[in-house]
């Protein structure tokens, strides 16, 4: 569809007049967000076990996980909490300690345990902050 300049005056019915429309705001506004984004929870991870553990058995699981990291790998765990997309959230002392456990599959009793980043779980969502509206 092409737009051509046209004179509307010949098409105005008798008794009507033309008025200039009020100024409209611009159709497109640009907003820029600047600054440094602070990364949070980079020391957190999600523990997933091969055969799921019932949520009522979380107390013994947390104790076993704490001793697994402390006794076998000499890593102190700050906090262990229940987790919906996995078995437990684990907070390490630093992101560097978390990096040691990402990737390999560990033998944890009769289970196979994997550790994934906190933001890469099954319910992870990403947001594209560079979109234009």
Image: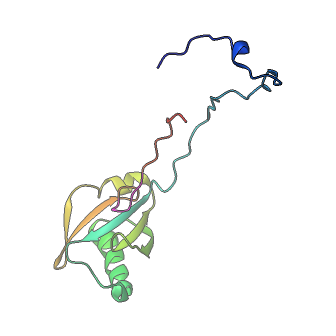
Q: Nearer the viewer, residue 125 or 15?
A: 15
Residue 15 location, x and y as percent? 83, 24
Residue 26 location, x and y as percent? 69, 26
Q: Nearer the viewer, residue 84 or 5?
A: 5
Q: Nearer the viewer, residue 20 or 39?
A: 20
Q: Residue at x 38, y 62 (%)?
A: 123
Q: Is residue 58 above or below residue 26?
A: below
Q: Nearer the viewer, residue 121 or 31?
A: 31
Residue 111 within the magenta-colored segment of the rendering = no
Side of 56 where 8 appears, left or right: right
Specify how the rendered protein is coloured.
rainbow
* Highlighted magenta segment, given as a residue range: 121-125
Q: Residue at x 44, y 57 (%)?
A: 43
- Which corner quadrant holds the C terminus? top right
Residue 29 location, x and y as percent? 65, 30
Q: Residue at x 44, y 75 (%)?
A: 81
Q: How many marks?
A: 0
Residue 109: image quadrant is bottom left
């Amino acid at each position: 569809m092409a737009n051509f300049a046209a004179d509307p005056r010949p098409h105005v019915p008798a008794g009507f007049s033309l008025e200039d429309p009020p100024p409209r705001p611009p159709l497109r506004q640009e907003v820029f967000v600047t600054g440094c984004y602070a990364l949070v929870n980079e020391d957190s991870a999600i523990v997933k076990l091969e055969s799921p553990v019932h949520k009522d058995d979380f107390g013994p699981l947390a104790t076993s996980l704490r001793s697994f990291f402390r006794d076998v790998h000499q890593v102190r765990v700050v906090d262990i909490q229940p987790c919906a997309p996995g078995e437990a959230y684990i907070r390490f002392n630093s992101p560097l300690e978390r990096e040691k456990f990402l990737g390999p599959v560990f033998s944890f009793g009769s289970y196979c345990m994997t550790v994934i980043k906190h933001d890469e779980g099954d319910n992870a969502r990403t947001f594209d902050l560079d979109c234009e509206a």
